[in-house]
Image (cartoon, grey):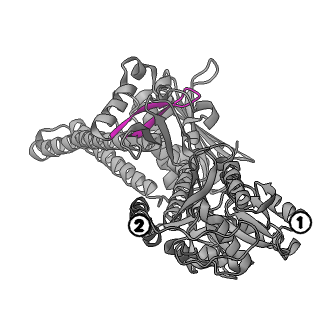
């Protein structure tokens, strides 16, 4: 600046009102204001264009603030003295500005009448502190720039100073609270540069508060700079009063960022609703997010587990009973795909008779009233078929305790129910077997006891014919007992999978005639005819196969009509033995269970083991037995088909 020339000044502040007030004050004091701007970009352009003596630069401005623009201004106009003009009363900010090359930092709280002398002090190299208005020396400059020596303080001025001291004390208390807060706090320019940070925020960043001053907060967000810019734009351009976002914190070199914070930004506005600066609160939410992540992972694993479970139908109902979720087990058990059933009322799973009585809705009411509900009953699949289900229904509540729906777990217990029914039938059959066996034992035992007693006491008085009749009764009853014991023993061995056969090469005719002789000697009446080729021979266990044929002959004698025919045929495929009679045959309702253990085939009170034994003996030889109902050309018959060699599959 040449001797006698007014200092040239460029004013840069985003508030037009502030620029008007400062310009008037400076021009009245003899400064030459050569340009004005509203942000850092304009400050750089004006510095290059005018190369002013002074550039009064606002710290916080939208887009590019003064801290960001300062290095470029000094690079383009090195002779310009840049004075930062700020609303932040921060020692760290002043130090940072001077490190960047600022000549001074003047707080906007400085009375405007003191601003010209402060700027003159900068030009003359007088310290950067605020001059004491009483003791500051006069400045030797051209024109009317020197400030006259002030008069002593009036009473009003003293009162003002006292009030200012009270205000200063409150400000200091706020600063102490700011610095000591457990939550990270920072003051930012409207474009995101940190101008003040407290110890808690510095602790999160692993540095001192002074290290954060002048730093763009976007550099601390680990890739979240664009998100920060959008949030600041919401405050400065769109008038939002609060915005929050989360970001990760930088980690030491070589380590992955793991800490997460939630930053809440609130604008501080002037009377014109312009953003002066932005206040930030920064909470460390790492532990919370880690817990939430673990919870989400646990919930996801549980969801996958539920979705993958195939044995249980696990699904959710909303509070009205509408299906809201569906797992693989539900699809397998009930037959519906998820898209077919979600959104449908759960009553579709219940039979019509249950729906008509309101049973499904009562289940939900009971679960809600008592905390859970369990039940077993018939349910419907998509195709209309029924299955026996075990069901548990539990109400579901949200975190506030509001009822939001029901969890329903269903398992298909049809197999278990069938096993229980089979066990029940088996027990009933065993009881029946014991009763029938007792009956079967009682009759021959009584015959043997009575006949033996008569022979012993009345032997001399009995005729030869009477003696033969009594002895025949004893023999017949004994044979009946023998056969009953044999059947029971054979069944027990077959049931224990220990039924063995010992094949021999025997005459088929002799085997069948033996069955006839045993039947006649056992007291069976009526003709029994045998038809078999004399030369035919078979490889079978003669005892086991003879027992099977005996049972078929006895079955024909008990339930059919004479004559009984026993026939055998041998060909290249094996041997077929057929036992028939002239009776009406087996009632159709009994045909499916003819060969079952303990099956009862009529009112005669037999054990129901005979035909079952025939099948087991045939299977032991690798053969099969079937029942042939009567036709116009054929009598009712049972037919045993055996392979040529035991153990080979039977012929078709």
Residue labelled with disc 2 = 165
Quadrant of the frame with the C terminus = top right
- Seen at 32% across and 43% down, the residue is 427
Measure the C-alpha gap from mark 2 to mark 1: 42 Å
What secondary structure is found at the residue carrying circle 2?
A: helix
Residue labelled with disc 1 = 48
Q: Quadrant of residue 361?
A: top left
Can you name the residue that lies furthest to the right here?
Answer: 49
- Seen at 70% across and 75% down, the residue is 122
What secondary structure is found at the residue carrying circle 1?
A: helix
Range of magenta residues? 372-394
Q: Nearer the viewer, residue 92 or 310?
A: 92
Whether residue 247 is situated above or below residue 509 in the rendered picture: below
* Residue 230 horizontal/vertical position (percent): 70, 52
Q: Is residue 387 magenta?
A: yes
- Seen at 59% across and 57% down, the residue is 278
Q: Quadrant of residue 106?
A: bottom right
Q: Quadrant of residue 100?
A: bottom right
Q: Earlier in the sequence, mark 2 or mark 1?
A: 1
Residue 482 in the figure: left or right of residue 116:
left
Badge number at residue 203 = none
- Seen at 61% across and 48% down, the residue is 623
């Amino acid at each position: 600046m040449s001797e006698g020339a007014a200092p040239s000044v460029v004013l840069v502040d985003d508030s037009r009102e502030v620029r008007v007030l400062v310009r008037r004050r400076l021009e009245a004091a003899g400064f030459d204001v050569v340009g004005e701007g509203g942000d850092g970009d304009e400050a750089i352009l004006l510095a290059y264009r005018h190369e002013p003596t002074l550039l009064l630069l606002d710290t916080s401005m939208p887009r590019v603030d003064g801290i960001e623009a300062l290095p470029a201004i000094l690079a383009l106009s090195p002779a310009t003295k840049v004075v930062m003009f700020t609303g932040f009363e921060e020692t760290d900010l002043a130090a940072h500005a001077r490190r960047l090359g600022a000549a001074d930092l003047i707080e906007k709280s400085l009375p405007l009448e003191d601003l010209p002398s402060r700027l003159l002090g900068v030009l003359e190299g007088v310290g950067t502190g605020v001059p004491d208005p009483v003791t500051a020396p006069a400045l030797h400059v051209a024109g009317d720039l020197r400030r006259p020596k002030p008069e002593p303080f009036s009473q009003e001025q003293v009162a003002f100073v006292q009030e200012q001291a009270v205000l200063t004390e409150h400000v200091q208390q706020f600063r102490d609270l700011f610095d000591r807060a457990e939550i990270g706090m920072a003051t930012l320019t409207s474009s995101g540069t940190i101008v003040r940070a407290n110890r808690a925020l510095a602790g999160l960043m692993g540095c001192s508060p002074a290290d954060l001053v002048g730093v763009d907060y976007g550099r601390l967000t680990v890739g979240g700079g664009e998100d920060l810019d959008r949030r600041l734009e919401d405050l400065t351009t769109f008038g939002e009063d609060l915005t929050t976002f989360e970001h990760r914190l930088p980690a030491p070199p070589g380590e992955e960022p793991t800490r997460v914070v939630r930053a809440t930004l609130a604008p501080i506005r002037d009377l014109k609703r312009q953003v002066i600066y932005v206040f930030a609160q920064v909470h460390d939410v790492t532990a919370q997010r880690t817990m939430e992540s673990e919870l989400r992972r646990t919930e996801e694993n549980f969801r996958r587990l539920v979705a993958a479970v195939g044995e249980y139908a696990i699904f959710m109902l909303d509070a009205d009973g509408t299906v809201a979720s569906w797992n693989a087990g539900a699809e397998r058990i009930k037959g519906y795909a998820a898209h077919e059933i979600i959104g449908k009322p759960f009553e579709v799973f219940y039979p019509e008779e249950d729906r008509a009585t309101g049973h499904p809705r009562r289940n939900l009411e009971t679960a809600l009233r008592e905390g859970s509900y369990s039940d077993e009953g018939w349910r419907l699949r998509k195709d209309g078929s029924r299955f026996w289900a075990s069901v548990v229904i539990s109400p579901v509540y949200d975190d506030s305790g509001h009822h939001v729906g029901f969890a329903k777990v269903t398992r298909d217990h049809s197999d278990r129910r069938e096993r229980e029914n089979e066990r029940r039938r088996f027990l009933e059959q065993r009881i029946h077997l014991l009763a029938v066996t007792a009956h079967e034992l009682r009759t021959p035992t009584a015959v043997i006891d009575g006949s033996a007693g008569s022979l012993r006491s009345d032997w001399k008085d009995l005729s030869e014919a009477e003696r033969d009749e009594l002895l025949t009764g004893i023999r017949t009853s004994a044979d009946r007992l023998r056969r009953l014991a044999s059947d029971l023993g054979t069944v027990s061995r077959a049931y224990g999978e220990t039924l063995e056969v010992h094949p021999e090469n025997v005459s088929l005719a002799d085997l069948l005639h033996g069955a006839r002789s045993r039947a006649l000697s056992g007291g069976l009446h009526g003709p029994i005819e045998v038809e078999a080729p004399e030369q035919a021979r078979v490889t079978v266990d003669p005892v086991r196969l003879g027992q099977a044929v005996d049972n078929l002959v006895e079955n024909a004698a008990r339930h059919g009509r004479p004559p009984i025919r026993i026939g055998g045929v041998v060909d290249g495929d094996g041997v077929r033995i057929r036992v028939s009679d002239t009776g009406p045959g087996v009632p159709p309702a009994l045909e499916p269970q003819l060969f079952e253990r303990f099956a009862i085939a009529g009112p005669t009170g037999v054990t129901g083991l005979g035909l079952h034994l025939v099948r087991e003996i045939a299977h032991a030889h690798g053969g099969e037995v079937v029942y042939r109902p009567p036709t116009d050309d054929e009598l009712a018959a049972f037919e045993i088909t055996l392979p040529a060699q035991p153990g080979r599959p039977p012929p078709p």
